[in-house]
Image (spheres, rainbow, N blue to C red):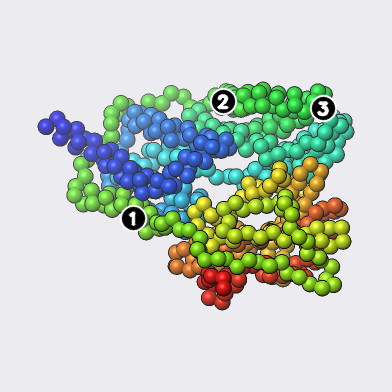
Amino acid sequence: MTTQASFINKYQRLIVLVLALAAVLFGWWDTVTHIANIVWRDDAYSHGLLVPPITLWLVWRRLGEGGMPPARLFTPALGLVAAAVLLWMLGRAMEAALFEHIALVVTVQAIVILLFGLDFYRQLLFPMLFLFLVIPFGGELVEPLQNITAKSVIWALGVLGVPYKADGVLIELSSGLYEVARACAGIKFLFTSMVCGVLLCHLALRSWWRRAAIMLAAFLVPILANAIRVLTTLLIAEATDQSFAKDVDHVVYGWGFLSVVLLILIALAYRFSDRGVEVAEGEGTMPTMPTLNAKGLAILLLAALLPPVAALWMYQPPEGASQCRIADVLAPECEDCGFRSLPRFDNTGYVIYEAADAEFLHLYRSGGNRVTAYGALFQPDRPEHRVIQGLQKNLQDDWTVLSGVPTQNAAVGGVPFEEIVIWRSERKVLLWWALFAGGKFQDGATASKIALGKARLFGGDTSAAALIFTVNMDDDLDSARERLTKFLSTFSADQFLWSQLKMPEGHAICAE
């Protein structure tokens, strides 16, 4: 018994740390599994699978070096836990997963500071901050990288004298039409290279200018190498055929490209390494960890319970859509306005929100041009039934977003629209997208998330809708914009809203 009691006293803080982190992970299990699902399924964030074990190894490595200050309770860190909990609640209300992810990692940091003290935490600063790299963020870089790759390849084709035609990320060679797709952006290689660069800076380099040089290389090398990859794939396709080029791209580049990039980076880091073998004073000794008293245990218990309590507060039972019949949105009509309503027939739309509670698709013709009006109602906006979704996954019949086109957001009748061009084969369509939430049209996805977050926090109406208007682009982009502007000046966007959304009180009602 004495031996067991001594063991518990010696490692009490570590045991309490494990129990506290277990309570946090249990309370925010949805957030944990959300991160896990992203890093497991999305290749761009697959580096996140290695971040937690590398963090634990770095912590163990640092503790083994010795020279650690004694562990001391740092009660002000309880305020950091509370701030992280509030951030998590805000993220949950706004459906801003990034806020939840950041709050989870900050809470882990705060509990370590609370239990062991600031001086102790400073000695573990790098591994603790390295843990933030598990957060899947930076998806907004895909489109800029896609455009950079396309422009680089187009420039190289011109230098090499290869005949081509280009439109944004579309490149036409004599062997066919190619798209520098989102998968060709090289985001996976960039993220993995950057994470590797950060780790190499810590392990191999001491001076800040060398670290800056390695991080610059970690950023530029994968971008340059990815452009070379796409260029050589196109040249192989031009010399042979498309199927052979795809096989080469998937087999050779898929297996070898990332390895080559990382080997170059590692070779550079250790070629210019200025960090010798370091032996810390007190090597091999564990840091002093005084036993916590009842007050300290109570403070740690409070910190550990805050996340589960916040999760319970924000819990929403599975909520279905309103069971009453939702009124149909009839196609607005006009006389001598230049737009004639058409009967709907199958496979005429470009977008379908499969999780919507109600939809409509109205077709119009003006001269030789067709305009479509599509709406999706979410009553209420809830898990697995969100109005804010990536448009790409809702596009039908192989339509895809065309990047590299000089799009610009528009506003007609006070309603803001996000502009997107989609394409399939050689057809192009201009698409304007508007979101209605919080009783009005919102200026983009972020404003819609804020409006819905306020409604969830303060008990407002969380009904929402997405409206999408499209017109074919048989000529230039400006002409297509003019046709959509004329259509939405003739039929205002609110004519395509469900009656439930237009009630003065903002409450969803049953149709008569």
| Residue at which label 1 appears | 309
**Amino acid marked by disc 2:** Ile
Q: Secondary structure at mark 1?
A: helix
Q: Which mark is residue 115?
A: none
86 with respect to 397 (left or right): left
Q: In the image, residue 97 lies at what x, y percent?
A: 50, 50
Residue at coordinates 78% horizontally, 36% vertically from top-left? 178
Whole-number angstrom distance, CA of label 1 to CA of label 2: 45 Å
**Amino acid marked by disc 3:** Glu
How many marks the image carries: the answer is 3
| Residue at which label 2 appears | 266
Sort mark 2 into few (<14), some (14-19) or many (20+) by Cα contacts within 10 Å: some
* Tag nearer the camera, 1 or 2: 1
The first of marks 2 and 3 along the sequence is 3
The first of marks 1 and 2 along the sequence is 2
Whether residue 423 is visible = yes
Of residues 294 and 464, the one drawn nearer to the viewer in this rendering: 464
Q: Secondary structure at mark 2?
A: helix
Sort mark 3 into few (<14), some (14-19) or many (20+) by Cα contacts within 10 Å: some
Q: In the image, residue 233 lies at what x, y percent?
A: 75, 28
Q: Which mark is residue 238?
A: 3
**Amino acid marked by disc 1:** Val
Figure check: 163 above or below 106: above
Whole-number angstrom distance, CA of label 1 to CA of label 3: 61 Å
Q: Quadrant of the N terminus?
A: top left
